[in-house]
């Protein structure tokens, strides 16, 4: 019996995503191609690996057992490929990024990049997008991963994704429109701070900022606890938040995450990291 690495990768993606459609999007493949890989893998092992027919795809007991081994096989395969694909490209890259890519996703990309380009030195700084954009304009960083309003995307920006902003609050909280509305904010450095404040002013509601925190985790905790309402992009809205009904009528811009290049730095290393960020973090839907 031979196990195909890419079929194992497809199995992992389907089980983690819960649907063939989402797994196909993550893998950059068609849904039929993913389904065929899973079927071929089941035929090779002679076992049913996923439960079909429900609203969400789940691994069977045999599928879970295979994934225990499959994870190690995929990790070893990818590490070997990275090792053998190491580049002699050298240089220094000063990267600025916002906290929107927390949770290990960006760290994983940078770790893989470091293994593939061991002679490139990465210096990474994290702050709100407004501050990161200032670093880029001032030449303090060479490359930036930042949020911009959709209308502010530049021709040479690499777009990772675009998503709407939504006014939200904690699922157990209620705010009456005739009272002063408490607002949670990231404070100065937030790229859409002016737009969110303008939307509140235009509504005629009375409001005041009750908390400013430059860290995403702090803002999320404040909103979830019911401290106030906040304008957040889709990826940062948690299961303990709900849309603010009155806020649905307040206009907010779409937000775009981009990779933006400055005027300094080594062109070849910058291009390599920019491509790595785009291929790993870009929205493939």
Image (cartoon, rainbow, N blue to C red):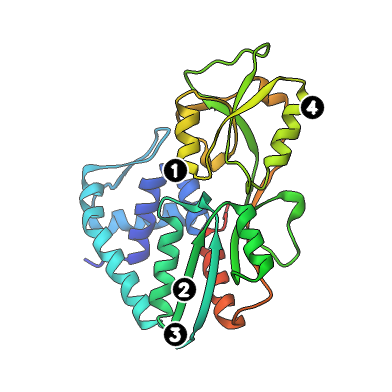
Instruction: Report, in whole angstroms, how far the alpha carbon at label 4 lies from the one at label 3.
Output: 54 Å
Label 4 close to label 3 by CB (< 8 Å):
no
Q: Dot 4 corresponds to which residue?
A: 202
Q: Is residue 139 above or below residue 64?
A: below
| Residue displayed at 53% across by 75% down | 93
Residue 3 can be seen in this image: no
Residue 133: percent from the left, percent from the top?
Answer: 65, 59
| Residue displayed at 46% across by 28% down | 224
Q: Dot 2 corresponds to which residue?
A: 122
Residue 102: percent from the left, percent from the top?
Answer: 45, 51
Q: Is residue 13 above or below residue 143?
A: above
Instruction: Report, in whole angstroms, how far the alpha carbon at label 1 lies from the one at label 3.
Output: 36 Å
Please tell me the numbered disc located at residue 196. Answer: none
Judging depth in this view, the residue of 42 and 221 nearest the camera is: 221
Sequence-wise, the earlier of marks 1 and 3 is: 1
Q: Nearer the viewer, mark 4 or mark 3?
A: 4
Residue 21 can be seen in this image: yes
| Residue displayed at 45% across by 47% down | 20
- Mark 3 surroundings within 10 Å by alpha-carbon count, few (fewer than 14), some (14 through 19), many (20 or more): some
Q: Dot 1 corresponds to which residue?
A: 19
Q: Dot 3 corresponds to which residue?
A: 87
Sequence-wise, the earlier of marks 2 and 4 is: 2
């Amino acid at each position: 019996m031979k196990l195909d690495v890419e079929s194992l990768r497809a199995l992992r993606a389907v089980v983690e995503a819960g649907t063939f459609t989402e797994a196909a999007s993550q893998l950059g493949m068609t849904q039929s191609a993913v389904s065929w890989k899973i079927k071929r893998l089941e035929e090779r092992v002679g076992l049913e690996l996923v439960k079909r027919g429900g609203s969400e795809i789940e691994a069977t007991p045999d599928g879970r057992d295979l994934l225990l081994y499959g994870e190690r096989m995929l990790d070893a395969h990818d590490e070997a490929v990275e090792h053998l694909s190491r580049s002699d490209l050298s240089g220094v890259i000063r990267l600025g990024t916002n906290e929107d890519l927390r949770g290990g996703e960006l760290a994983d990309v940078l770790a893989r990049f470091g293994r593939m380009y061991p002679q490139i030195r990465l210096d990474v700084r994290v702050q709100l997008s407004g501050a990161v954009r200032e670093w880029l304009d001032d030449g303090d960083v060479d490359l930036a991963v930042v949020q911009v309003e959709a209308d502010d995307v530049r021709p040479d920006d690499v777009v990772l994704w675009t998503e709407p902003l939504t006014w939200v609050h904690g699922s157990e909280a209620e705010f009456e429109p005739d009272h002063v509305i408490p607002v949670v904010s990231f404070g100065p450095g937030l790229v859409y701070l002016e737009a969110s404040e303008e939307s509140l002013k235009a509504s005629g509601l009375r409001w005041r900022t009750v908390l400013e925190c430059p860290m995403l985790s702090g803002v999320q905790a404040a909103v979830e606890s019911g401290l106030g309402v906040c304008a957040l992009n889709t990826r940062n809205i948690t299961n303990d938040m709900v849309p603010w009904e009155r806020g649905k009528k307040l206009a907010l811009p779409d937000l775009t995450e981009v990779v933006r290049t400055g005027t300094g730095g080594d062109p070849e290393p910058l291009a390599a990291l920019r491509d790595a960020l785009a291929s790993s973090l870009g929205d493939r839907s």
